[in-house]
Image (cartoon, rainbow, N blue to C red):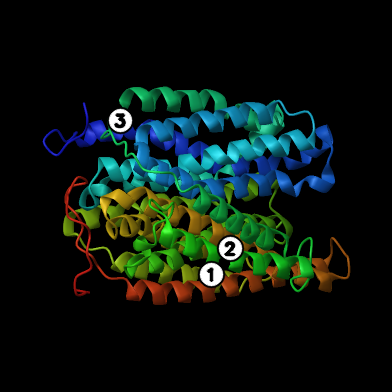
Amino acid sequence: MSTTEQEAPSEGRIRLMLLGVMLAMLLSMLDNTIVGTAMPTIVRDVGGLDHLSWVVTAYILATAVSTPVWGKLGDLRGRKNVFLTAIVVFLIGSAASGAAQTMGQLIAFRTVQGLGAGGLAVGAFAVIADLVPPRERGRYQGMTSMVMALGTIGGPLLGGVVTGHLGWRWAFYINLPLGVIALIWSQVMLRLPAVKKSATIDWPGILILGATISTTVLAATWAGVRYAWTSPQILGLAIAALLGLAAFIWSQRRAVEPVLPLRIFGTRNLPLVAVLIAVVGGVMFGCSLYLPLFQQTVQHASATDSGLLLLPMMAPIVLVSQFPGRIMTRTGRYKIFPILGSILLAAGSFLLATMDTSTPRVMTALFMALIGGGLGCMMQMTTAIAQNSVEMRDIGAATAAVTLFRTLGGSIAVAVFGALFTRSLQNADGAHSGPAYLHAVANGTQHIFFLAGALCLVALAAALLVKEVPLRGKPTSPQPAKEPVTTS
């Protein structure tokens, strides 16, 4: 039985259906951060230190490239079957990664795992869009916010525990029982409208988009780390990315069923949401990477403690996210939340940029709480705004675009942050301890969060320009979302 306007499921039924979806989404978000903690152990076991970065890069790259494809397939072939397929691909990649005997095998299997992860992330949000109209979506926002917070920030802590007690292979094997539960639960519980369109898959667009995303992510990953920013390699990748973007736009204008329809960018809101979510991704990844490093090095926290010390940021994400969704459901108004979120992110980032070797942990925790509050206002609201700005036939494509920009924003921001941090460490004259080194780490952290604060001001400008499009009342509404004169 399909979900229709006449047979709309109850709130309790929807929450039951979403449990399996949330579990699958958690797996995709946890995996990369868990594996990062296991890296030293992996190298000791299988070797391949010179290719270590590719274990992470291959996963991120495959996720980014596959995200728009999964989103479009869901629009064309039905959300449920595509989502279940993504779970299966992710589980195959997880099992193979855990059994890898060489670094080359691990990189190859991580690519398969990343392909599945791209479908889990976009599929989860698109399934919610199919089940719940935008006006009611805030009721379920806490579930997705909690999953995103746990996946992004709780991963390193869980990774340390799993690797320390069970071995690095269980950083992958832990996905198997949880993934099977998510697969069976979603198969049995999910009730979605059957969709199957006889449309040609845009393979040229998929290939061009994949190449463009790959060159962008590789340039962001290697710049300032493997190659200098002005090196021929990085400049070549940047030029290739720009040419790929031009070719992709050209191909999408001519495709019968484009993989990422340009019409979704025809409204003002989606490009603005792209800016917002890219900044959110950059700040989120920057905090999860560099705050633990600052806490371990400058504030002398242990590796386990640094994971726990991220709780002041994780808890506000979960708590604050409850209120925007409920207010959006009750009033239909939402523009204030990306504005407030940008302000909180900017304030938290600029305050983190003031930290030095004498900053106590309690002050760091207070600054992090502002970041968490800002993320709680924005992480899910940006997806809701994007989905409400397009027609129902483009929900998957719009959701994929948001997920893609979050990944790209995080990748590019981390690359720039890494270059700033490395430059600061060069002032320590090769020392790895002592006052000079501690000052260099603190100085690098200051530069990172000052830049993050500046990016948050750009996000604030974008949030102020968002048009408050009336929220659709039913997910099956035949009327497309149009932008009226702004009422804000």
**Residue 347 is at least partly visible in this image:** yes
Identified by mark 3, the residue type is Leu
Whichever of labels 1 and 3 marks the residue nearer the N terminus, that label is 3
Q: How many marks?
A: 3
Name the residue rendered at 84%, 70% in the picture.
Answer: 428
Residue 432 lies, in percent from the top left, at: 85, 60
Residue 60 lies, in percent from the top left, at: 61, 49
Identified by mark 1, the residue type is Ser
Q: Secondary structure at mark 1?
A: helix
Pointer 1: residues within 10 angstroms few (<14), some, or many (20+)?
A: many
Residue underneath mark 2: 244
Pointer 2: residues within 10 angstroms few (<14), some, or many (20+)?
A: many
Pointer 3: residues within 10 angstroms few (<14), some, or many (20+)?
A: some
In the image, 154 versus 487, the foreground residue is 487
The residue at the far left in this view is: 6
Residue underneath mark 3: 16
Whichever of labels 2 and 1 marks the residue nearer the N terminus, that label is 2
Q: Is residue 464 left or right of 480 when viewed as pictured?
A: right
